[in-house]
Structure formats: structure tokens, C-alpha cells
Amino acid sequence: MSDSTITVTESAQEYLVDLLSKQDSEGMGVRIFVERPGTPYAECCMAYSAAGEEDAADTKLEFEGFSAFIDAESAPFLEDAVIDYAKDRMGGQLTFRAPKSKVPQIDENATVEQKVNYILYSEINPQLASHGGNVQLIGLAEEDTVAVLKFGGGCQGCGMVDVTLKEGIEKTLLEKVPQLKRVTDDTDHSVNENAYFK
């Protein structure tokens, strides 16, 4: 069955029906979403979704024997996605191809997180790459006004990280994402009071 967003092949449907039947929970379905969408680290995920657990904004796809719920925020990144199941010597494997999952999608409706990620991956990381470094968004704090970043590669342990953060990255992000008030890195424990990413 195909939808404008996602295709679940017949073999994948059979596999999921079998898998869900073993959960011993009436009306159990699956929820499909993308973690870190629009970034090079995007990961397509599928989780069990008990009856009534779905989000009101989810798109519901009906298959024979189960329902799949597409996370609303992930939907644009799952366009043209294909979920397939291929049997092999070890039993089989569920595969997930979502060509748009890593592609940033920025418009006026983009979340603060999407905007920050877009700038990090399109502008800032290409510059840091010349020094063998990179930076990624760990999360947002203080009602999405503080971006908490983590440095990696050649940036880790570099004495210039503070300068890079304040002079370059923070300046760029505050200018392009007006909702932000400041930018910090994951070693700044003052923002961890109410942070969800502890």
C-alpha cells in the first residue's frame, strides 16, 4: 500500500503484522518518526504504539492488520520513504529508506531546532570541517531561547572553542534565529537545571 508520504511493501506489512501479533495488546500499531530530521545524523525510527497512544497530529495509515502513525513533524522528511523487509540467512531485516530525512527543510513554519540545525549543517560545520571539527545541537533550554551545542572532532579539547562559540557560532545563530537569546556548549552546567537532555 502506498501513500503520498510513505510506502510499506507487502513483505514489510506481513512482517509487522506478525511482530505486532506477538505483543499481545489489542489495537497495537507502529509509530514512524525521524530523530534529528534534516541533519546528517537523521535516523528513521519505528516504535510500538499502543491503542490510544498516538498523537492527535499524527497521520494515520491503515494497513491490513495494523495501523501506522506518522509523526507530524517528521512527515515532510518521510516523503518518498520506503519500508521493506527482506528475508536472509539470519531470518530477515526491516529496511527504511527515506531520501529526504537528512535534507533540511526550512520555511517560516520551521521550529527553532530545525532552524538552528539548518544553520549548523549548511554554514557552520562546513567552516569547522576545514579544522577537522564539527558541532551539533544537543537540545534547547529555557523555553527554546538557549541552544546547547556539543563540539566534536578537532574542536574537542581545542583551546579556541570558547572564541569560536562566542565570536562565530553564537553571533551567526543569534542573527539568524531571533528567538535565541544565547548559545552555550554542553560543558556549561548552568543550563542543566530544567533541561530535558541531561
Image (spheres, helix red, strand yellow):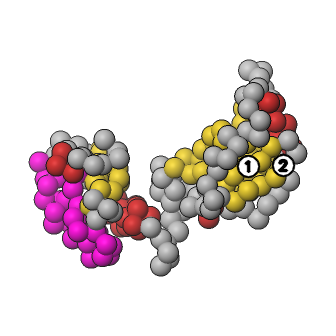
- Location of the C terminus by quadrant is top left
Under mark 1, the amino acid is Ala
Mark 1 touching mark 2, by CB under 8 A?
A: yes
Disc nearer the start of the sequence (1/2):
2
Question: Is residue 66 part of the magenta span, yes or no?
Answer: no
CA–CA distance between discs 1 and 2? 8 Å
Residue in the picture at 70% in, 43% down: 51
Image location of residue 161, percent across then percent down: 17, 52
Under mark 2, the amino acid is Phe
Q: Quadrant of residue 89?
A: top right
Question: Is residue 160 part of the magenta span, yes or no?
Answer: yes
Q: Which residue is mark 1?
A: 68
Q: Is residue 155 visible?
A: no
Image location of residue 10, percent across then percent down: 86, 43
Q: Is residue 156 above or below residue 79?
A: above
Q: Which residue is mark 2?
A: 63
Quick check: 88 left or right of 161? right
Q: Is residue 75 above or below residue 93?
A: below
Q: Residues within 10 Å of mark 2 (few under 14, many from 20)?
A: some
Frontmost residue, 27 versus 46: 27
Image location of residue 152, percent across then percent down: 30, 45
Q: Is residue 107 above or below residue 131?
A: below
Frontmost residue, 123 versus 117: 117
Frontmost residue, 142 versus 152: 142
| Span colored in magenta | 159-185
Residue at the outermost bottom position:
108
Q: Is residue 157 visible?
A: yes
